[in-house]
């Protein structure tokens, strides 16, 4: 049974998460174009009309406006709403698992980095350095003060293992395929992910990332959604593998994931 405080916190965190998701939509659109993510305020990308506050309520406004701009009638992508909803759900999910503590804040920051990284990588095949620097800054503060369930030395080793493995795979792919197989942005992202996970869970995250990527590429190729020469963004798969690995550090479902992992790997 949900305690009374949670009955207040969960809707509140949903609104907070959805609001951050709305901001992430701005970041996802503007940052690759090297536009300010602060000014001007949100506007229709078609007619450039500023979006009124009443029309900019996360999730709700999309349905009130039937997914269209009030001024020009251009349809908005449903992805805006999906990003807002995803961010809200992830905020609540991690609160339910960890409660309101340092672990929750640290993991939430990571998720809030991975959401815009994922969609920017999908759209533009890049991972902006601003996210990497922010993530390393957060780790630089969080690890020494034990804000994560690993020691700072485990975080350092995890960063080296995660990024080092991606860098090595990239070199091997470059040598065999004669083209870039793992982007350096993915390697830099690995520094952050490994720092959060430590060595053991970095290995699990990498395992899951490559497994998910292989399955998705097989499906996309089989369905002829892409061809063999298509460039595949790997950031989303690293994010997915990391999410699974983080959830494995918690008893809520984590033991099942770890049992499966060890049974297949060893």
Image: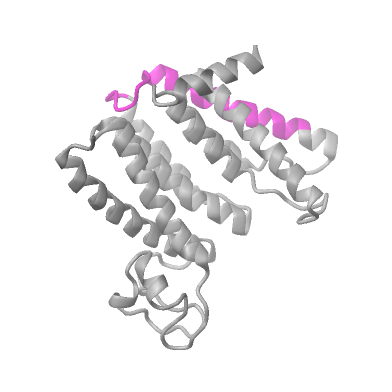
Query: Main SS type for the magenta part?
Result: helix
Query: Is 187 placed left or right of 251 in the picture?
Result: right
Where the C terminus falls, by quadrant? top right
Q: Residue at x 42, y 43 (%)?
A: 111
Height in image: 55 above or below 183?
A: below
Where the N terminus falls, by quadrant? top left
Snapshot quadrant of residue 161: top right
* Segment colored magenta: 144-172
Snapshot quadrant of residue 167: top right
Could you say where residue 192 lies in the image, as x and y percent from the top left? 47, 34
Could you say where residue 229 lies in the image, as x and y percent from the top left? 82, 51
**Could one spot residue 24 in this view of the protein?**
yes
Q: Residue at x 37, y 33 (%)?
A: 139
Height in image: 225 above or below 69?
A: above
Could you say where residue 67 lies in the image, as x and y percent from the top left? 47, 75
Could you say where residue 40 lies in the image, as x and y percent from the top left? 36, 74
Is residue 162 within the magenta segment?
Answer: yes
Please name whichever residue, 134 or 50, is drawn nearer the observer in this view of the structure: 50
Query: Is 38 placed left or right of 128 in the picture?
Result: left
Height in image: 146 above or below 42?
A: above
Q: Residue furthest left?
A: 4
Q: Residue furthest top?
A: 266
**Could one spot residue 195 in this view of the protein?**
no
Is residue 177 within the magenta segment?
Answer: no
Please name whichever residue, 182 or 95, is drawn nearer the observer in this view of the structure: 95
Q: Residue at x 74, y 50 (%)?
A: 220
Q: Residue at x 38, y 62 (%)?
A: 22
Please name whichever residue, 137 or 112, is drawn nearer the observer in this view of the structure: 112
Height in image: 240 above or below 144?
A: below
């Amino acid at each position: 049974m949900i305690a009374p405080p949670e009955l207040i916190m969960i809707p509140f965190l949903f609104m907070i998460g959805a609001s951050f998701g709305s901001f992430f939509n701005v970041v996802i659109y503007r940052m690759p174009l090297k536009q300010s993510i602060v000014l001007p305020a949100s506007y229709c990308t078609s007619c450039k009309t500023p979006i009124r506050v009443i029309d900019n309520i996360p999730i709700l406004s999309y349905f009130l406006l039937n997914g269209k701009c009030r001024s020009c009638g251009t349809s908005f992508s449903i992805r805006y709403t999906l990003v807002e909803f995803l961010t809200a759900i992830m905020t609540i999910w991690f609160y339910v698992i960890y409660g309101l503590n340092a672990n929750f804040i640290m993991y939430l920051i990571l998720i809030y980095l991975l959401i815009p990284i994922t969609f920017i990588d999908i759209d533009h095949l890049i991972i902006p350095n601003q996210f990497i620097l922010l993530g390393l800054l957060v780790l630089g503060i969080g690890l020494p003060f034990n804000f994560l369930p690993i020691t700072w030395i485990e975080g350092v080793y995890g960063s080296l293992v995660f990024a080092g493995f991606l860098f090595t795979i990239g070199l091997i792919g470059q040598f065999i395929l004669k083209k870039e197989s793992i982007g350096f942005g993915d390697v830099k992202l690995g520094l952050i992910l490994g720092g959060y996970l430590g060595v053991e869970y970095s290995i699990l995250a990498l395992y899951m990332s490559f497994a998910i990527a292989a399955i998705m590429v097989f499906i996309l190729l089989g369905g002829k959604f892409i061809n063999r020469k298509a460039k595949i963004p790997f950031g989303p798969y690293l994010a997915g593998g990391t999410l699974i690995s983080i959830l494995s550090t918690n008893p809520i479902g984590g033991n099942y994931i770890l049992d499966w992992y060890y049974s297949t790997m060893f």
